[in-house]
Image (cartoon, helix red, strand yellow):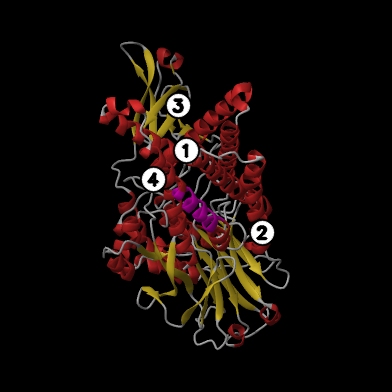
């Protein structure tokens, strides 16, 4: 007779379906099932024998067998994953036996999981079971587990079938909705090519997004008449609105969670009568006109369900049109350059609105132009411009659109120079930036200390000018290091706008100060090598300081006063488009022209000079000396900064368009 002894379970089980399959994420589990006594008449040796505690390593994690008497049977609490033939069974079954020759007890065990089919075959198994209220959570739970893995085109298609069958239940269960949204979030992490191929095959990604939006029409709201869920790539919010809400203004804004440990996730803010605008512009915002509630066919117009969704990655909606454009060698990449934001009012499609919905987007990539306002057309399974038009760029750099219907909105732009870097490449470039700036700063500080500590060096005007130039460059590098340290994520506002404006102002100031002192250095070299006679200038250093330190301060203050709230960017602590043009490019351009003229005059003077001994020197030595002089003068005059100047012109051009 078999007797079962209950042992308290020390792990959490999650039902998969009505066959009681279970999922666990633990990598090490202690045996937790019952002990079975097997019939038989034990001998004296058997009564004294005991199997020792043992730890077994399996492909599914470590299992610990507790000590036990002979004939005891142990079943592990760790269960076979859903990708295996015997999903849900205990990974290990062990029986305590006696080795009669050694007169020693041992565990005789076996693995029960069978063949590992992989995620896609497991999904195929799931979709074969009809979904009901009884098993929907089990099937969705297993699907959520499987979609965390890399699945192929077939897996995406199967997942779409599972989600559509779930929506057909019209379940109001909040956990059903929560798990379904997590599945969509998982799929958005798949390889973009997989999603594109799946969309080409049977429009599975589009069907998945539609299934999520339909499920949000069924979910039960909380006591506060709301449902809210924020994942890594998806944010959804469902509210119950009234006519008064639409009259006072209703919309949604998507922000990054700056300053939190979830800063890589989006956050939603409902914009109603109590909404207070943030200093930081939203990444996406949608404003609903009152007309949408007037056109809604609901029993009670004061009780209208409004659903907002934001997708941070657009790969879940792959476009065949964009793929064809980008196959051509155009020098840019035509792509979605914003988050995807949508609204559904009363569970209905709203078309032909006389008062259009207004949508604003902050471009994700800065070097982009040729904006086109679009929506995702589920009919053609692609982006469309029908009923939408661009209102241009706002003063704070947001792209503004308006559309006469409600659906999923985004902006298409031509993106330049956006070659994707891997995380490793990005990390290496970051380290090189820190190392290069720190070494340059160290060299400048050593130069300053060397000149300041020697009376013979620090009293001469040329050396004083060089020390001021080193001081300006040191300030520039230190501010730059501080900026890249506090603003580590591209496209995110990680620093308060006031603080970011101060950092941008200091960077602006030291950049201009460095160039101005280079101009002073060039003028001093002109006096030494070109004028020679009557080269003395009274109070040269005082006048040079007014140019080197005073002029940049005047430009920064004037630019900041003129630009005010549009002086600095919030996602990267540097100047916005117009301050960059007027406060940086124009002054630098003038200084560059001045220094180039001085360079030509100085090199011509040095080339014309012929010491008495020159005739006896080899031409090669004379040529080498001229090249060396040219390089040194070029560096001192900052002419190598011309390359950065051209880069700034290109960046400002794209920002302006």
Q: Which residue is mark 1?
A: 529
Q: Of the two numbered discs 3 and 1 on the same chain, state the one appearing first in sequence.
A: 3
The local secondary structure at tag 2 comes to helix
The local secondary structure at tag 4 comes to loop
C-alpha span from label 3 to label 4: 44 Å
Q: Which residue is mark 3?
A: 65
Q: Of the two numbered discs 2 and 1 on the same chain, state the one appearing first in sequence.
A: 1
Q: Which mark identifies residue 422?
A: 4
The image shows residue 241 at horizontal and vertical percentages of 66, 76
| Quadrant, the N terminus | top left
Tell me the chief SS of the magenta region. helix
Count the marks. 4
The image shows residue 75 at horizontal and vertical percentages of 43, 34
Q: Are the residues tagged 2 and 1 within 8 Å (C-beta)?
A: no
The image shows residue 406 at horizontal and vertical percentages of 51, 78
The local secondary structure at tag 1 comes to helix
Q: Of the two numbered discs 4 and 1 on the same chain, state the one appearing first in sequence.
A: 4
Q: Is residue 75 left or right of residue 279?
A: left
Q: Of the two numbered discs 3 and 4 on the same chain, state the one appearing first in sequence.
A: 3
Q: Which mark identifies residue 558?
A: 2
C-alpha span from label 3 to label 2: 77 Å
C-alpha span from label 4 to label 1: 50 Å
Q: Residue at x 68, y 72 (%)?
A: 272
């Amino acid at each position: 007779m078999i007797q079962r002894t209950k042992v308290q379970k020390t792990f959490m089980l999650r039902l998969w379906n009505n066959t009681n399959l279970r999922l666990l994420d633990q990598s090490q589990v202690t045996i937790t099932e019952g002990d079975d006594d097997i019939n038989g008449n034990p001998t004296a040796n058997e009564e004294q024998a005991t199997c020792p505690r043992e730890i077994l390593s399996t492909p599914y994690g470590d299992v610990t067998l507790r000590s036990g008497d002979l004939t005891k049977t142990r079943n592990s609490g760790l269960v076979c994953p859903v990708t295996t033939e015997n999903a849900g069974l205990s990974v290990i079954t062990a029986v305590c036996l006696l080795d009669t020759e050694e007169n020693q007890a041992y565990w005789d065990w076996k693995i029960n999981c069978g063949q590992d089919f992989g995620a896609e075959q497991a999904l195929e198994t799931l979709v074969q079971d009809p979904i009901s209220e009884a098993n929907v959570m089990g099937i969705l739970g297993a699907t959520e587990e499987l979609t965390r893995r890399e699945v192929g085109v077939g897996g995406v298609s199967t997942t779409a079938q599972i989600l559509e069958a779930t929506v057909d239940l019209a379940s109001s269960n909040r956990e059903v909705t929560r798990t379904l949204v997590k599945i969509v979030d998982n799929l958005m992490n798949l390889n973009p090519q997989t999603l594109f191929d799946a969309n080409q095959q049977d429009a599975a990604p589009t069907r998945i997004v539609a299934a999520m939006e339909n499920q949000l029409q069924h979910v039960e709201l909380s006591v506060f008449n709301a449902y809210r869920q924020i994942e890594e790539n998806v944010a959804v919010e469902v509210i119950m609105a009234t006519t008064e809400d639409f009259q006072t203004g209703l919309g949604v804004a998507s922000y990054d969670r700056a300053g939190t440990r979830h800063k890589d996730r989006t956050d939603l803010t409902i914009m109603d009568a109590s909404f207070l605008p943030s200093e930081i512009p939203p990444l996406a915002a949608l404003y609903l006109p009152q007309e949408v509630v007037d056109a809604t066919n609901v029993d009670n117009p004061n009780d209208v369900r409004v659903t907002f969704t934001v997708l941070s990655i657009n790969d879940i909606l792959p476009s065949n049109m964009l793929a064809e454009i980008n196959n051509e060698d155009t020098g840019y990449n035509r792509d979605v350059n914003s988050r995807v934001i949508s609204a559904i009012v009363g569970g209905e499609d709203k078309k032909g609105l006389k008062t259009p919905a207004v949508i604003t987007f902050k471009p994700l990539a800065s070097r982009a132009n040729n904006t086109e306002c679009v929506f995702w057309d589920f009919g053609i399974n692609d982006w469309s411009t029908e009923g939408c038009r661009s209102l241009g760029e706002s003063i704070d750099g947001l792209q503004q659109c308006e559309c006469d219907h409600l659906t999923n909105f985004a902006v298409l732009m031509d993106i330049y120079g956006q070659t994707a870097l891997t995380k490793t490449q990005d990390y290496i470039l970051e380290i090189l930036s820190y190392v290069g700036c720190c070494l340059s700063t160290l060299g400048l500080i050593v130069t300053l200390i060397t000149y300041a500590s020697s009376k013979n060096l620090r009293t001469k005007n040329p050396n004083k000018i060089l020390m001021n130039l080193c001081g300006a460059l040191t300030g520039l590098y230190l501010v730059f290091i501080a900026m890249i340290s506090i603003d580590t994520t591209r496209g995110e506002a990680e620093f308060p706008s006031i603080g970011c404006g101060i950092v941008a102002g200091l960077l602006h100031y030291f950049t201009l100060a460095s160039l101005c002192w280079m101009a002073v250095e060039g003028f001093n070299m002109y006096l030494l090598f070109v004028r020679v006679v009557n080269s003395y200038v009274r109070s040269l250093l005082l006048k040079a300081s007014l140019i080197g330190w005073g002029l940049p301060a005047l430009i920064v203050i004037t630019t900041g006063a003129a630009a005010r709230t549009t002086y600095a960017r919030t996602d990267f602590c540097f100047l916005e488009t117009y301050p960059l043009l007027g406060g940086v490019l124009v002054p630098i351009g003038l200084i560059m022209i001045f220094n180039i003229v001085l360079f030509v005059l100085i090199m011509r003077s040095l080339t014309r000079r012929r010491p008495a001994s020159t005739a006896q020197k080899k031409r090669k030595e004379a040529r080498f000396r001229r090249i060396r002089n040219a390089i040194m003068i070029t560096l001192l005059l900052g002419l190598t900064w011309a390359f950065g100047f051209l880069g700034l012109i290109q960046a400002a051009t794209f920002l302006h368009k």
